[in-house]
Image (tube, grey):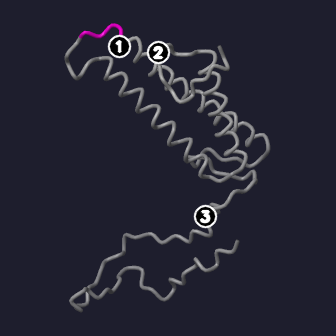
Amino acid sequence: MSHEHHHHDHAAMDSTTASFTTTTGAPMQMDMSGMHHHDHSAMGHSMSFHGGLKEVVLFQFWQTASPLSMILSCIVVVLLCFVMEATRWSRMKREIVNKATTTSDSPVTPHRLIDACLHAVQLTISYLLMLVFMTFNVWLCVATVCGEVIARLLFTCFLPVEGAHTSAETSCCT
C-alpha cells in the first residue's frame, strides 16, 4: 500500500510564519517558529500489520532488533497481561470482601481509595497494552491477545471470585 499521496512538500513554506485569511477576509499572521515539522514516512511506523523484528515498543529504550529481543518483548507483554488480570482479580476479590464487612456510611473510605489506586494501575496497564498492539507488529499483537486470553482464563478457572458476576463466568472449570 503506497502512502506517497500523504507526502506534502513544505519546502516552499516559511517555517516561522503562516498567513491565513479570517472569515471576515482580513489577513492574519501566525508565529509558528516553535512548531516542529516531521516527515511521518521517515519515522518508520507502519500503519498496517507487519511481522518484522525491528520495533520500538512503548519507549525509545525498549527496541527489538533480533529474534531474541522480540521473544523477550513478547514475554514481557504476556507478563504485563498477567499483572493486569491480577489487578482486576484483586479488585473483584476486595469488592466481595468489602461488601461483607463494610458498615461505613462515608463515601470516601480506605477501601475505596485503595480500589481507586488499583483501578488506576489496571487502566494504565490496559492503555499500555493497547499501545503495544498499535505497533501493528504481528508478534506483539499475538502476544497481547494470547496473554490476555490465557491470563483471564487462568484467573477465572483457578482463582474464581465467589459472588462476582463477570462476563467470563463459565462452568467449564468447576
Q: In screen coordinates, is 139 left or right of 87?
A: right
Residue visible at 62% across and 52% down in the picture: 135
User: Residue 43 has which mark?
Assistant: 3
Q: Is residue 22 above or below residue 88?
A: below
Q: CA distance from mark 3 to mark 1?
A: 51 Å
**Circle 3: residue type:** Met
Hey, which residue is sitting farthest top in the picture? 101
| Among the two numbered marks 2 and 3 on one chain, the one whose residue lies closer to the N terminus | 3
Hey, which residue is sitting farthest front in the picture? 171
Q: Position of residue 25 (x, y in %)?
A: 24, 92
Q: CA distance from mark 1 to mark 2?
A: 10 Å
Q: Is residue 77 above or below residue 38?
A: above
Q: State which quadrant residue 3 falls in.
A: bottom right
Q: State which quadrant residue 35 falls in.
A: bottom left
**Circle 2: residue type:** Gly
Name the image quarter holding the N terminus.
bottom right
Secondary structure character of the magenta stretch overall: helix
User: Residue 99 has which mark?
Assistant: 1
Q: In screen coordinates, is 162 left or right of 74?
A: left
Q: Is residue 30 above or below residue 112?
A: below
**Circle 1: residue type:** Lys
Q: Which residues are magenta?
A: 99-103
